[in-house]
Image (spheres, rainbow, N blue to C red):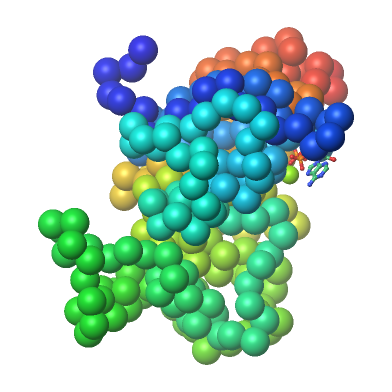
């Protein structure tokens, strides 16, 4: 057991779709301010796990705790407002809105801005605080210069960065990223790695699903490996990539 209480805890979580055991009894803890990674072959249940953690997929059994309170029964919106943000495996920006408007939308809909005393900010004070958070998210992700463009005018890699900006604009306490570098070149992947490390420097806890093993080893503090809905290994990146079960299931060696 660690000295600090976990930010997030999954206890024996399962998600079954009819006879398919997409997630089949998983328990883990995420501690504050670290980047956690999930490795696993296609179909091993990674996206389903993220869906369950964000209330988009119904849990068959088990439970989650976030900052010490259970949330399995809460809606996706209330989980998001509670501080769990995610990006999707496929880009989900609103095509008719500009980059700035897409990011602003998350701050408006999700972020419960408080003045530090738990009471929500309202009116012009709220708008100013939200505008600052949106500007910060755009600065961090390098999207400040393209705020007036629409998603269709951007490269795929840039659209993915806007997705991350949108997630950050909601000022989450836990950020889940589903294959954020899929379809990116090496240079763009390195930029995303740098971005996630700068978010970690701000104290943001992250759970990253990614296929690029080198990137996972470079970026993550702790890795989980999944296969067929189960956790088959966890530990430091160095430990996990040389685990025989992981080599067999994932790396094909
Ligand atoms: P990964 O993200 O690791 O590639 P997924 O979580 O997408 O894996 O899928 C895990 C398994 O669950 C796969 O067999 C997939 O076909 C199945 N699955 C995922 N979502 C659904 C769904 N909505 N209905 C039925 N089966 C699903
Ligand atoms: Mg997936």
What residue is at 57 percent from the left and 26 percent from the top?
62
The tally of labels here is 0
What residue is at 76 percent from the left and 32 percent from the top?
16
| Residue 83 locus on image (x, y percent) | 39, 51
Q: Residue 211 versus residue 122: which sits nearer the camera? A: 122
Query: In the picture shown, does residue 136 fall above or below 233?
Result: below
Q: Residue 176 versus residue 66: which sits nearer the camera? A: 66
What residue is at 32 percent from the left and 44 percent from the top?
203
Residue situated furthest front in the rendering: 73
Query: In the picture shown, does residue 202 fall above or below 229?
Result: below
Q: Give the side of residue 209 with respect to residue 246, left or right.
A: left
Residue 219 shows up from this direction: no
| Residue 165 locus on image (x, y percent) | 48, 65
Q: Residue 248 versus residue 25: which sits nearer the camera? A: 25
Q: Quadrant of ligand 1?
A: top right
| Residue 207 locus on image (x, y percent) | 52, 40
| Residue 88 locus on image (x, y percent) | 65, 56
Q: Residue 189 versus residue 42: which sits nearer the camera? A: 42
Query: In the picture shown, does residue 67 fall above or below 61?
Result: below
Query: In the picture shown, does residue 152 fall above or below 91?
Result: below
Residue 49 shows up from this direction: yes
Q: Give the side of residue 12 with respect to residue 35, left or right.
A: right
């Amino acid at each position: 057991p660690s000295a600090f209480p976990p930010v997030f805890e999954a206890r024996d979580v399962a998600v079954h779709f009819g006879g398919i055991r997409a997630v089949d009894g998983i328990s883990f803890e995420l501690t504050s301010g670290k980047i956690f990674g999930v490795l696993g072959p296609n179909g091993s249940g990674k996206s389903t796990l993220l869906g369950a953690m964000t209330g988009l997929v119904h849990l068959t059994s088990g439970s989650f705790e976030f900052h010490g309170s259970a949330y399995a029964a809460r809606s996706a919106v209330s989980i998001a407002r509670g501080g769990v943000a995610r990006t999707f495996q496929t880009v989900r920006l609103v095509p008719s809105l500009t980059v700035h408007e897409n990011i602003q939308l998350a701050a408006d809909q999700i972020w419960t801005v408080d003045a530090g005393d738990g009471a929500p900010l309202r009116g012009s004070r709220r708008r100013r605080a939200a505008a600052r958070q949106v500007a910060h998210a755009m600065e961090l992700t390098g999207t400040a210069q393209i705020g007036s463009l629409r998603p269709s005018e951007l490269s795929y890699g840039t659209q993915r960065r806007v997705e991350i900006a949108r997630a950050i604009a909601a000022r989450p306490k836990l950020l889940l990223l589903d294959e954020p570098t899929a379809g990116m070149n090496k240079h763009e992947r390195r930029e995303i790695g740098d971005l996630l490390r700068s978010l970690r420097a701000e104290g943001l806890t992250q759970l990253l699903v990614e296929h690029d093993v080198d990137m996972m080893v470079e970026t993550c503090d702790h890795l989980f490996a999944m296969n067929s809905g189960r956790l088959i290994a966890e530990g430091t990146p160095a430990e996990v990539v040389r685990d025989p079960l992981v080599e067999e299931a994932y790396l094909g060696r």
